[in-house]
Amino acid sequence: MMTTKLIMKTSKNWSKINGAILAANRKEGARLVLVALLFLLGKTTVAGEAGHNPFLASANQQLAQTIEYIFQENYPAADSVCSEIISDYPQHPAGYFMKGILHWKQGYFLNRYNEYNDSTLIWFSQAIDIADRGMKTTPGDASIYFFAGGAYGYQGSVYARRKSWLKTGMAAYHGIRLLEKSMAMDSSLYDIYYGSGLYHVLASHQPGIIRWLQRLLPIPAGDAKLGLQYLQLAVNKGEFTSLAAVSALGLAYVYYENEYEKAIELLSPLVARYPRNLDFMTNLINAYFYREMTRPTNDWQPVLKLIDQARQEVRTRNIDIQTWWLDKFDFIEGYSDYMNGELDSAARILGAYCNKYPQKGDSYLTALGYLTLGKIADRQSNRKEAIAYYKKVSGLEQMGNEKQLAEKYLQNPFQNETNSNPFNGAFADIQDRP
């Protein structure tokens, strides 16, 4: 699908532009994962609800069961149904696409995620190859374009985790084109609004990255307001993506809109329905964490209970989860200890965290950790130690106004939370590190 002209253009310019991207957008690097169209499907449906598309009507129950198993994180069962879809519809990309989704989801939180990413790319490549043939033999089947667009989107997310920026941009470019064509062919495919909505929300918060990619590829700029409207449309009318769109709206409210109560309202039912789903659980943990950091009340029990639930799930299933997730849970517990007046425990936990992630680029939480350690030292009348902590804050990545507060407390010792400027978070990050 990629023209010779486009290949020549990207090859000629990319080495120069790639260096500029990395230099100008160091914090953006990991977040290019977001620019890809993420298509985690999600609504359990009944046969016959798939609009006018013959394939979706025929394969509805199998697709719905696969999606349900993936949300349950029952991967062996999901794999079995995916194999059935491939066996029943070998010339349609859906089964291969769902296999790719399965591997992508299965490896997402693991230290060994690159192992799963290899197999993920293989399945999505097969889905794209099958779709290319299907576009020639059955050019009027919009579902073929839909699943091919989703496959490109997930390919992009894998390439982004590997920091293969050109491949990420190319995957997004192809995915967008195919999804737009699918919608033009069948306006009843409201599921497409999930991917388009998520793209607009994410891309609108990555303006530097998008501008660079637009020099290479005709991809749209992000429109956050439009993205939220699209996601709501997918919630209301999506055949397969309704629950995923609910999750995406919650994610947008957590990381971009700072609407934590709305996020909690959306994500809590998903965690209740899918108590093993670490994706839903960690997003809800973040919603509670950020809410408590930015409001005058002090109710840490919901987030601490969720952290216990997540840890229990990791232990029960013996998941080799990426260590920084567990470290982030520790950080939240340490910060809650501080807010509850347990200063010695907070100092021990937050000190250990900052020692593990001391440098810029290690963690988005370290600046807040040092700021809090400085507050503890001031409250314990150890001014020299407090000053040393405050001085470390400015050289680190900021989640909010840590630097401003540290500069204030360098001039005047911190006294207590009620007499200080409150922490003001700006959490426009979906992180692949703490």
Image (spheres, grey):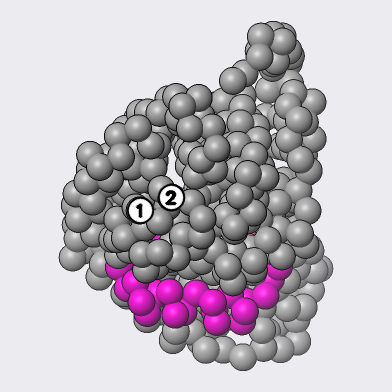
Please indicate, yes or no, whether residue 148 appears anywhere in the rendered image. Answer: yes
Q: Which residues are magenta?
A: 254-279
Percent x, y for residue 358? Answer: 53, 48
Residue located 50% across and 24% down the image: 136
CA neighbours of label 1 inside 10 A, class few (<14), some (14 to 19), many (20+): some
Image quadrant in which you'd find residue 47: bottom left
Q: Is residue 261 magenta?
A: yes
Q: Amino acid at mark 1?
A: Ser
Q: Secondary structure at mark 2?
A: helix
Tag of residue 58 = 1
Image-based side of 129 in relation to 145, left or right: left
**Which residue is denoted by mark 2 in the rendering?**
54
Horizontal placement of 234 versus 80: left or right? right
Q: Main secondary structure of the magenta part?
A: helix
Rendered location of residue 132, percent (x, y): 48, 26
Camera-side residue of 351 and 222:
222
Q: CA distance from mark 2 to mark 1?
A: 6 Å
Is 66 drawn above or below residue 253 in the view shown? above
* Residue that appears at 79% across and 73% down: 412
User: Could one spot residue 387 in this view of the protein?
Assistant: no
Does residue 147 lie above or below 331 as drawn? above
Q: Amino acid at mark 2?
A: Pro
Whether tag 2 and tag 1 are in contact, CB under 8 A, the answer is yes
